[in-house]
Structures are given as C-alpha cells and as structure tokens.
Image: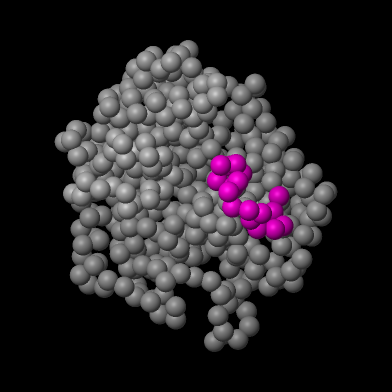
Amino acid sequence: MTQDLSAYWMPFTANRQFKKAPRLLTRSEGMYYWDDRGRQILDGVAGLWCVNAGHARPKIVQAIQAQAAELDYAPPFQMAHPKAFELADRIAKLAPAGLDHVFFTNSGSESVETALKIALAYHRVRGEGSRTRLIGRERGYHGVNFGGISVGGIVGNRKMFGTLLGGVDHIRHTHDPARNAFSVGQPAHGAELADDLERLVALHDASTIAAVIVEPVAGSTGVLLPPQGYLQRLREICDRHGILLIFDEVITGFGRTGQPFASQTFGVTPDLVTLAKGVTNGTVPMGAVLVKDTIHDTFMNGPEHLIEFAHGYTYSGHPLACAAGLATLDTYAEEGLLTRAGELGGHFAQAVHSLEGEPHVIDVRNVGFVGGIELAARPGEPGKRAFEAFLDCYEQGVLIRTTGDVIALSPPLIIEPAQIDRIVEAIRTALRRLA
C-alpha cells in the first residue's frame, strides 16, 4: 500500500498521532482482526459497536456477492425492489409490538435526522404544528449531523459548530457516581431524574414540544445505564403531555442488551426507534427508523398520488444493504445471537466488575454485552490515561475503545467466556502499567 497517509483525513481520530504510528487492519474473521504486521487482534468492541455476529460471516458475505451480480442498485423513489419489503417485514417482526413500519436510511446519524423529521411532520399533519421543539439529554450522542448534534449533549461534538438548530433543549443526564458507582446492571438511584422533563414542559409548555430523544443506554458518552424506573417514568411524562418518545438504539439494537432491542430489555415501548450498525453486521452501511402504527397511519391521508412524507435518500433500502441485512438476521436467528448477551451476561458482568480496585478505576458499569470502565482523569490531561490503556491493549493483541476517560467494551455476540476473560485481563495489565 501507499506509504503516504496524508490524503485521508480520518474521522474521530487524533490524525497526527495515528500517522506517526499507524494501526492498520488488513483482514478479519470471527472474533479477530489481523493487522499489517500479521498480528491477531481480539475484537472487544465489535468493530464500532456494529459487527454483532462476528467478522466475515459466510452467509452475509455470499449474500452481498450474489446481490451485486443480480441487482446492484434500484431507485428508491417511486420504485423499489423485493428485498427492501422483505427486510422491513423481518425487522418489524423483531421490534416491540406496534412498531410495524420501517423507514430505511444509510447510517445512525441519518436515522436520527429522519426520526426528528417524522416527529415534527407528524404533529403538523395531525393539526398541532406548534409542536416544533425537540428535547435531547445532556451527554447524549445521536450522530454527527446538525439535528443529531443539536439534540445530542456531548460538548466536544457541539462546540465548534455554532448555534446549531433552534428550539432545542436538554434534560439532565443520569450519571450519578456518588450514589451508583460499581452498580451491576441498572443502578438503583435516579428514576426521579426523568422528572426534569416536567421542568422543560413548565418552561416551554407542552404544546410546543414535539419529541424527546434518549439512548436507552448512552454509549459514546461512556456507557451510562438508565436507573431503575427512569425510562418508565419518562414514558409516562411523555404520554401525559402528548410528546413523542424516541429511543436511539443505534448501539443497543440487535442483541446488545440480551433482547433484540433495549426497549424490550427494559420493558418500555417508545414511539420511534432509530437503528443502524447491527442491522447489516456492519458490512454495508444501513440505518432505519421503526415507526409506531398510529404515527405512520396519520400520514396516509390525502390524495393517493401525492408523496405523504417528503424525505429519503438515494441509497435508502439499497439492494446490497438489504441482502446483507437479511443474511445478518438469518445468522442471528440460526445461532440464537439476539439473546446470547442475556445468557452470558452474568459472566461478562463478573469479569468487568473484577476490575474494581485496580489502579485508577473509579466506576464499572454493565448491561448485556456492554461494559464501561471509568478511570480517574489525569490532572490536566483528560482522556489521555484511557487512551494509553487503549494503545497498551492493542499491543497486547486486544482491541478496546475509549471515550474520554472511559474504556468501553461491546464485543461481538459470538464471544466465548475465555475471550471475555482475555479482554479483561489485557485491560488489567494495562491499568497496572499506567501512571
């Protein structure tokens, strides 16, 4: 390959550091990557929260190859192809009851933009066009498009891009280490934090609020779990005031928490669900929005020849993505992967919580196959301690992910107990070497 790495401006990467000591992955299979030095790297993060069934799965690879030869592209506006309808039906059958309609996008960021637009348009169509305000949550991550960073609450993703969308506000985050540090599973304290939505209702009036969007488990901000009863209370407040509730399940969808969707794990059904990543096992870009029947049906009025919702993408429901999605769902079903994180979640929890007491560890959080190990920040150098742990683990042949001073784990659902233990031991070794 070329030795000149300057042309590629890498996303969410410390480009100068990387290009001095590149970490180049050249192939993958099962639980592993291989790098350009021929070293095997155990994948502790499913690529980027997306390769839920493991790498280079034969059924998925073959489906993509066959689809490219049969139908490489079909226009999604006023035209379609059969696999788009088949995949939508399969996804809807996995979803919580009542979320029976699927709008395809190409990424999690696009799914968020789509869900926000559906919410705004829905209220206008039903005669409440004054509901234009969108509510996010502090420390939330909803992709990187303008709508997503506007409702998102991660400072580093927002600060460079001006005033963003107007009419957006945020409820409090749920991170409460003083009461909930080292909780196994959902923390006991904090359901009352959902009441912060009532503060915004009092400030803005419910008649101006279209939707609230939250992640059931906040991933990119450092693995923040919902306190027991929190999502239920948020659902109740939204119902009371006619506000739509959107769950961003781009990370938690497709088995990450032990059920197909986290909304099923936590027993709360939203009005809209954004998804991506695991829908195609990360092989072909794809996202989607699950839409409640009552919302979809509200649009299906007026003259039949007119477009009901003026939105979509050139690659919505792309044939290769649909083929990959169908093969991915087959793989999940044949191997029981969508519930495997529930079955092995106990071992995973015990392993990650064994890091309590190790140097620099101030909290451990977990649900299903999601783990967060929070480290004390090095004075004056936020994020650097965790980044050094990331580099150390990579040299040990284990891939982890960091966000700020939190080590995040989200391994493929095919992981075995011994591989969980190896990932955790690599982290332990790195922590004991850190200053």
- Residue 69 location in percent, x, y? 20, 70
Front-lying residue, 276 or 89: 276
Relative side of 100 to 54, left or right: right
Q: Quadrant of the C terminus?
A: top left
Relative side of 367 to 180, left or right: left
Relative side of 402 to 394, left or right: right
Res 272 quadrant in image: bottom right
Q: What is the magenta range?
A: 153-169
- Residue 242 location in percent, x, y? 73, 57
Residue 45 sits inside the magenta stretch: no
Front-lying residue, 236 or 179: 179
Q: Residue at x 60, y 46 (%)?
A: 159
Q: Residue at x 24, y 37 (%)?
A: 32
Image vertical order of residue 291 relative to residue 392, above or below = below
Residue 158 sits inside the magenta stretch: yes
- Residue 67 location in percent, x, y? 24, 67
Front-lying residue, 401 or 198: 401
